[in-house]
Image (cartoon, grey):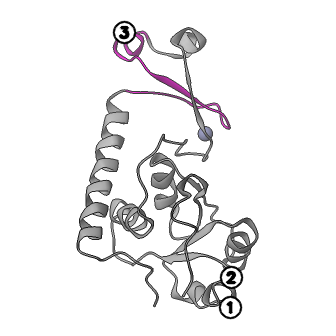
Amino acid sequence: MAQPADQDSNRDVRFVCDAMLGGLARWLRAAGYSAEFDVHFSDGEIVSKAFAEGTILLTSDSGIMQRYAVSRGLASAIFVPLGLSVIGQLAHVLAVLSLPLRQSRCMDCNGELRQVPLEEVADRVPKKVRLLCKAFFVCERCGKLLWHGTHWSSIRRRLGRAQRMAASASNRKHTGLERT
Ligand SMILES: [Zn+2]
């Protein structure tokens, strides 16, 4: 059976998602985990990446699970069941690895977010937002500016839902690596 990374070193947990799981990659980033996704990655490339870089491969493709490096446990992989909502997929991964929510990363590019004082970005922030929001973040990779507003609250609510679903799945002992 393929094994996930050491569950005691969550800070090093990084993912690479297959071509079907781009939405999950975005939500893993929101949950604070590095998740690589590129629709151009071939099946062979993502297996090689998982093997060479120690990332955990997430796939809904049973063919990928049966590839040599995965089936022999040389590359870590988790099968994400088909038919789940993206929040259900996230809950599944959180439950399998017992992962907590962390400081969000950029959902667009996987970059780390750095909190910045308003003065540093004031010229990029609409006046109304300047009055209402207190926390501002810049993506270290793509430069995108984010703030804790209503969109952020909606993201945190959905993350909280995934966390509760994961806790509930753990309680029902539905965790563990799934294989086809
Ligand atoms: Zn970014």
Q: Which residues are magenta?
A: 127-148
Amino acid tagged 2? Leu
Q: Looking at the image, which residue sits at the far front? A: 8
Q: Is residue 64 visible?
A: yes
Q: Residues within 10 Å of mark 2 (few under 14, many from 20)?
A: some
What residue would you read off at disc 1? 68
What residue would you read off at disc 3? 131
What residue would you read off at disc 2? 74
Mark 3: which secondary structure?
helix
Q: Nearer the viewer, residue 62 or 101?
A: 101
Is there CB contact under 8 Å for labels 1 and 2? yes
Q: Residues within 10 Å of mark 3 (few under 14, many from 20)?
A: few
Q: Gap between marks 1 and 2, in whole Å?
A: 8 Å
Query: Under 8 Å from ligand 1: the CB of mark 3?
Result: no
Q: Looking at the image, is mark 2 or mark 3 earlier in the sequence?
A: 2
The quadrant of the rendering that contains the N terminus is bottom right
Q: Residues within 10 Å of mark 1 (few under 14, many from 20)?
A: few
* Above or below, 53 relative to 180: above
Residue 170 falls within the magenta-colored stretch: no
* Above or below, 46 relative to 131: below
Q: Residue at x 45, y 66 (%)?
A: 97
Amino acid tagged 1? Tyr
Q: Looking at the image, which residue sits at the far right? A: 52
Query: Residue 60 location in percent, x, y?
Result: 48, 78
Is there CB contact under 8 Å for labels 1 and 3? no
Query: Residue 163 location in percent, x, y?
Result: 32, 55
Mark 2: which secondary structure?
loop
